[in-house]
Amino acid sequence: MARPDLAGAVARVFAPPLALSGFDVTEASTTLVTLESGRSALRLSYNSEDLPRPWLSVAVGVSDVQGNPPVLVALWRVFPEESELQDPARLGFSSQGELEDRLVRVRDDWFPRFVAPVLASEARLQTALLEQERELLAEHEALKHEQHLRNARSLFDSEDYQGAVDKYVLAGVGTLSAADRRRLAVARRNLSAD
């Protein structure tokens, strides 16, 4: 499958209606298009690594300062109760024609129902951006926790008991599994025996 051209598709499907709404294309490539109007932004994109059947991603946001890239949040995060915004069958495509069909749905259905109202309500958009930030931070902390545990286990297995204790403490002693608590206790015993 040839890589579908998102910029060309947006030019054909979106240009006239969005130009009337004051949106201009500020960034365009084969896989990403950003449209902005004042402080409001709409980004359409897909991940080429998902070929041969990628799915269209729709994000909305605001620019805090003219010239800076907009801060964006996926549309499904703003409306988590709307399953159609997360349905790969409604967003996936395998040809240029299917991509353009998805863009027509965004233009004719999602723009008036979801995009325009959220861009008009900065409070709802800010709430979604803060929630996204909290979720990403929690995900980052969970990854850090898992990395500390992997490191602690590896250090324990190589008999670096001080390193294992340090990593277990970083992971949070109160969050350890029973097996990790046993390893920590053994490591501390071995350190005190030295």
Image (cartoon, grey):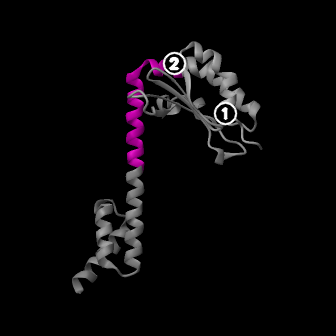
Disc number at residue 116?
A: 2
Q: Is residue 179 visible?
A: no
From the image, tell me which residue sits under label 1: 6
Residue 157 in the image: state x and y as whole percent: 41, 79
Mark 1 packing: few (<14 Cα in 10 Å), some, or many (20+)? Answer: many
Image-based side of 165 in relation to 32, left or right: left
Image-based side of 116 in relation to 162, left or right: right
Whether tag 1 and tag 2 are in contact, CB under 8 A, the answer is no
Residue 28 in the image: state x and y as whole percent: 60, 33
The image quadrant that residue 97 belongs to is top right
Q: Decide whether residue 149 is among the magenta residues.
A: no
Q: Decide whether residue 133 is among the magenta residues.
A: yes
Q: Is residue 40 visible?
A: yes
Q: Which residues are magenta?
A: 115-139
Mark 1 secondary-structure assignment: helix
User: As shown in the figure, which amino acid type bears the numbered disc 1?
Assistant: Leu
**Of 66 and 89, which appears nearest the observer?**
66
The image quadrant that residue 88 belongs to is top right
